[in-house]
């Protein structure tokens, strides 16, 4: 599973991208957030913020959404457009 971080989440994660080994069983976006934030309290707090958004394969998704090992998940901080 490929994981992307944008904005300040990239800085908190220390990378723009990471991956989850195939032998790690992660079934929801919430579980993935907990996995990638393990040991990084600032990243965990940011990922748990209600304003943080997630996308699975370039489509916005809830943190309760199901995942499979081939998914690409992006975590994004709050943003605005115009």
Image: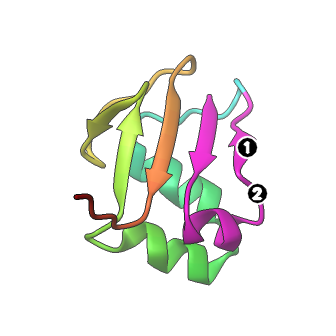
Residue 2 versus residue 69 in the image, above or below: below
* Magenta residues, start to end: 1-21
At label 1, counting other C-alpha atoms closer than 10 Å, the crowd grade (few under 14, some 14-19, many 20 or more) is some
Check residue 37 in the rendering and tell me which mark sits there, or answer none: none
Residue displayed at 55% across by 64% down: 7
Residue position marked by numbered label 1 in the rendering: 18
Q: Marks 2/1: CA distance?
A: 7 Å
Residue displayed at 33% across by 64% down: 79
Q: Is residue 5 magenta?
A: yes
Percent x, y of residue 36: 63, 56
Residue displayed at 66% across by 73% down: 12
Who is closer to the viewer here, 77 or 31?
77
Percent x, y of residue 80: 27, 64
Percent x, y of residue 20: 69, 36
With 27 as the anchor, is 13 left or right in this view? right
At label 2, counting other C-alpha atoms closer than 10 Å, the crowd grade (few under 14, some 14-19, many 20 or more) is few
Q: Is residue 28 visible?
A: no
The image quadrant where one finds the N terminus is: top right
Who is closer to the viewer here, 52 or 27?
52
Residue 33 versus residue 7 in the image, above or below: above
Residue position marked by numbered label 2 in the rendering: 15
Residue 45 versus residue 3 in the image, above or below: below
Who is closer to the viewer here, 72 or 34?
72
The image quadrant where one finds the C terminus is: bottom left
**SS for callout 2:** loop
Q: Is residue 80 visible?
A: yes
**SS for callout 1:** strand
Residue displayed at 26% across by 44% down: 64
Percent x, y of residue 40: 67, 76
Who is closer to the viewer here, 14 or 27?
14
Q: Are marks 2 and 1 in contact (CB under 8 Å)?
A: yes
With 49 as the anchor, is 32 left or right in this view? right
């Amino acid at each position: 599973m490929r994981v992307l971080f944008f904005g300040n989440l990239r800085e908190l994660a220390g990378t723009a991208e990471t991956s989850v080994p195939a032998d790690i069983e992660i079934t929801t976006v919430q579980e993935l957030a907990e996995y990638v934030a393990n040991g990084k309290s600032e990243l965990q707090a940011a990922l748990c913020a209600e304003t943080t958004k997630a996308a699975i394969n370039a489509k916005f998704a809830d943190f309760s959404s199901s995942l499979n090992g081939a998914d690409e998940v992006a975590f994004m901080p709050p943003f605005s457009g115009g």
